[in-house]
Amino acid sequence: MESPQKPSYQPAAIEEKWQQTWLELGLDKTPQDTNKPKFYALSMFPYPSGSLHMGHVRNYTITDVIARLKRMQGYRVLHPMGWDAFGLPAENAAIDRGVPPAKWTYQNIAQMRQQLQRLGLSLDWETELATCSPDYYKWTQWIFLQFLQAGLAYQREAAVNWDPIDQTVLANEQVDNEGRSWRSGAIVERKLLRQWFFKITDYAEELLNDLDKLTGWPERVKLMQANWIGKSTGAYLEFPIVGLDEKIGVYTTRPDTIYGVSYVVLAPEHPLTQVITTSDQKAAVAAFIKEVSNQSELERTAEDKPKRGIPTGGKVVNPFTGEEVPLWIADYVLYEYGTGAVMGVPAHDVRDFKFAKEQNLAIKVVIVPEIGAEETLKSAYTEAGILVNSGDFNGMNSIDAKKAIIEFAEQQNFGKLRIQYRLRDWLISRQRYWGAPIPVIHCPECGIVPVPDKDLPVQLPEDIELSGRGGSPLAQLESWVNVPCPTCGTPAKRETDTMDTFIDSSWYFLRYSDAKNEEKIFDSDKVNDWMPVDQYVGGIEHAILHLLYSRFFTKVLRDRGLFNFDEPFQKLLTQGMVQGLTYMNPNKGGKDKWIPSNLVDANNPIDPQTGEPLQKLYATMSKSKGNGVAPEDVINKYGIDTARMFILFKAPPEKDLEWDEADVEGQFRFLNRVWRLVTDYAASPKQLTTDNGQLTKAEKDLRRFIHIAIQAITEDVVDEYQFNTAISELMKLSNALTDADCHNSPIYAEGIQTLVIMLAPFAPHIGDELWQLLGNKNSVHTQTWPSFDPAALIADEITLVIQIMGKTRGAIQVPSQSDKAELEKYARESEAGQRYLEGKEVKKVIVVPGKLVNFVLG
């Protein structure tokens, strides 16, 4: 009689089956029972662009493995998903297609939700949120009003980066080093507009100090944030303007160089510029200001750009020397930074030295490396040293002089000690439609009036015409703009700016804890229970802004009494990029140099247009490079579990991953080997036996291998998430089971079950299918993660190497607990020992316990 045919591994059928089963069982729902310890696993939520790319797949797979592991380790897990859905890209896409942004966005969300669900991620879709939904942005607006009440939201006129194509304000980070908009590519202009700001500078010190609490964050991310906050200690010094009662204040970290000041520079936008400019310089200064006003901030401050300036004709007095020095304006000084003025010390500042040389300004040496050193300079001397030409401070070292000069300035009312931050208040206004409207009303009688809570959300009107031109689209809709003042009833106008989309993403992780609450932003008990996020996973590109803003929001809302924790994210994993094989023509420039891989013969890589040889390299997957791999193509060919296994095995999560189909194929073969191993075992008749409770040597060896694997994999995945080495250990365990010859032993059964359970978080569909084929009724994902038995790790026997004069002559099995004397005895009595030692004088015996015995002959 023929044996029944074993089922073959069919990924598509298995994956569809188990995703439906998990849905029916509600396996991924967030538990309400608070008896278990909590674990909050979160991926940075995606922008709904319309289709997933491999970077998404990697991010969500990493977090999914962590979530599945933690459930098996006894935690109740919150693993949610949502959509960062407001912003210019949706508005621009809607304009291009002639459809409302909401329609375009929700279509993309539906498509990407379907793609994510196909990946078999253990997400609780009942917590899903979209930042563009009124039931979400109602609470974004409520948070804005909390900031307003706390004195942390304000409006002022400011010089801003203006995108002339997208007709909106850009943050500095949205302007590239060529002064172009990150979206439209337009040269950014400077423009004065009345804008809304959040006072993040009030929290600068706490944001900086609390970086020390973030022990689960990469050091480079903490350093990036510390540098962005940019704390410095220095002096605020005032220079009286000649002929006026006004003074110009400067901030400097080098007060020890005050005697070397040979000029003072104002920002062109500084209000005093017009006051101090002499009549003969007015025309030249006005022309210079107009020219500079069209440059972006990055363009003005770029290190590789020449520094340009012009004298105003005005002068100030150095309060320490009484000397009059000229006042200039220059493009590299910005009004928004510090005081909008800097003192020029060419001898001890690289930029000032270059500027003074170009403009023929005085260069005075006031610090030298040592007493008696030469005072002529070929370049700026910027190190510490000894003060010279500095009046009463001559001979002091520059460190002590800083303190002494600040104390003298305070005594004489010239200035004072000041701590300053590079961080500036957050400009949140955007002159676009597709964002959360700022919930205030401008009343001619009452001024700025917050929209009452009961009237939230201030909804975006749907009857809007979008052109992408001419400022805020909301300002064009009079029926929406004109409203009575909620306080006095006087005809008033709504604020027409919308909020920066970084605001939406600065609190979404809080909402997941109580995502469907219609009465309040969230229940404090629930958010205190689930927060902080235990493991946050996302790209390094969010290291500064998103993460800093989220920390800021958390501290403000804590101070508003909404919860009791200080930091939002306990551990942070910044996953590497997914890179594809890329072809480049070095003889072409711009985007044309990238040749899409589908146009290239891999065996003969030449440019199909010019016939020139191409360079091969790995680069981050992108449409512009034509080197992307569509997730659905891989899934259709190999299945989801194989795609997950490859992504996890190819590189540690924090490293870049080079896509290679041969390695994908390798993981597919491994899953097929596991499939055959387990299905062969499940199909074979078993008579589980042991020899009167005593394990044979083969059983002991296999049990030790099983528990070594449990220990190694657990160590790999508990804290460091080294999934690549964990999968290597799974492969070793699979090989050990394949080679074992004790199939009827309970130890072999333990090994098969252990392999399937530990494979399940990485390859969840095949894991559940094999678990069922082994005769189990419950899902493998409800099983407890195995723990290793320390006793099983101890070998009964070891291999003892026998050496004569340092050369290996044999090896024997001996009891692992043998002492040195016993090991020497076993070695002497062995066949190799008797053969090589007979008739010889043993001068010395070297015993290395657990390894070898070496006989040194006379």
Image (cartoon, grey):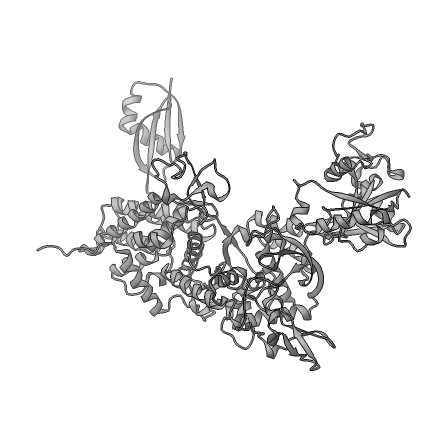
Which quarter of the rendered picture does the N terminus lie within? bottom left
Location of the C terminus (image quadrant): top left
Residue 400: x and y, percent? 81, 41
Horizontal and vertical percent position of residue 23: 35, 68
User: Residue at position x 31%, y 46% from top?
Assistant: 665
Extreme residue toward the left, this view: 1
| Quadrant assignment, res 474 | bottom right
Nearer-the-camera pick, 530 or 453: 453
Do we see residue 757 in this rendering? yes
Q: Position of residue 541 (x, y in %)?
A: 54, 51
The single residue placed furthest to the bottom in the displayed view is: 489
Q: Is residue 334 left or right of residue 689?
A: right
Q: Is residue 733 above or below residue 612?
A: below
Quick check: 366 left or right of 206?
A: right
Side of 566 where 402 appears, left or right: right
Residue 192 at what x, y percent from top left? 70, 59
Q: How many marks?
A: 0
Viewer can see residue 121: no
Instruction: Give residue 556's quadrant in the image.
Output: bottom right
Judging depth in this view, the residue of 855 and 98 nearest the camera is 98
In the image, is residue 9 above or below residue 599? below
81 w.r.t. 731: above or below: below
